[in-house]
Each structure stands twice: as structure tokens, then as C-alpha cells.
Amino acid sequence: MILQGCVHIHANGIVHRDFKFENILVDKTEGKLKIIDFGMSKNENEVQHESLNLRVGSNLYMAPEIFLEEGNYDSYPCDIWAIGIMMYFMICGEYPFDADTDKKLKKNIKKKRL
């Protein structure tokens, strides 16, 4: 369901830029998941013209290209990466690149070292 929501917002030209568990709610009355916190989200056209020096999101869920500052890293693939991190956690019960410090975490993600 999270991926379906992501596909929907992407189809409408929105890049969320902060997918994480804290931004997914369960609506028990409707039995649906709700994606929240669009405070860092951007319209696809806005992202293409924004400075690449701006890093947004949460380190545990950031794609390697964000830390490597390669290409247009504020785009749809980075949302998909974050959802992949969430799925990994749901299956394995731990984050794939977890580390003691932010510095080590960033290094592990850049090298894609589990």
C-alpha cells in the first residue's frame, strides 16, 4: 500500500523526499495507510530547478546518490529507495545500513555496505 501511495503522488508530479515509518499512518476506520508530512515535498518541476546542495530527508532512508551528490538526487528514485529501506526493515527487523554514528551510516550507504 505504501508503494501504491508513492506511485499515486509521483503520477501527480510530486516527490515526497522524506519517506519513513513516522510519515505513514494507519487509518483504522478506512483500513488504509496514509502518507503524511509533505513539508519537504516538491513538485517535479521545482525539484529540477532547486540547488543540489540542499539535502532533505532522514539519514537512515537516504539514497547513496544524496550523500555522493551525484545527478539530480532529489527525484523519484530516492523516494523508491526510502520505501525499499522500509521494506527491508519490515522483512528483516533491522535497518540495512544502521551504524553507531551518522558519519559511519553515511559511509556505509555510500559504499552500499550492509
Image (cartoon, grey):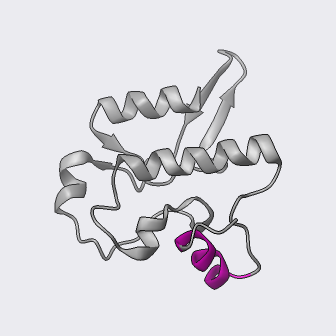
| Residue 50 falls in image quadrant | bottom left
Residue drawn at point x = 31 percent, y = 77 percent: 53
Residue drawn at point x = 66 percent, y = 82 percent: 104
| Residue 7 falls in image quadrant | top left
Residue range in magenta is 101-110
For the view shown, which residue lies furthest in the right direction? Answer: 93
Left or right of residue 102, residue 14 in this image? left
Residue 72 vs residue 9, the one in the foreground: 72
Residue 12 vs residue 91, the one in the foreground: 91
Left or right of residue 82, residue 22 in this image? right
Q: Is residue 38 magenta?
A: no
Residue drawn at point x = 28 percent, y = 65 percent: 71
> Which percent across, then down, holds residue 61?
58, 58
Q: Is residue 27 above or below residue 81?
A: above
Q: Is residue 102 magenta?
A: yes
> Which percent across, then down, holds residue 94?
80, 55
Residue drawn at point x = 43 percent, y = 53 percent: 78
Residue 46 vs residue 86, the one in the foreground: 86
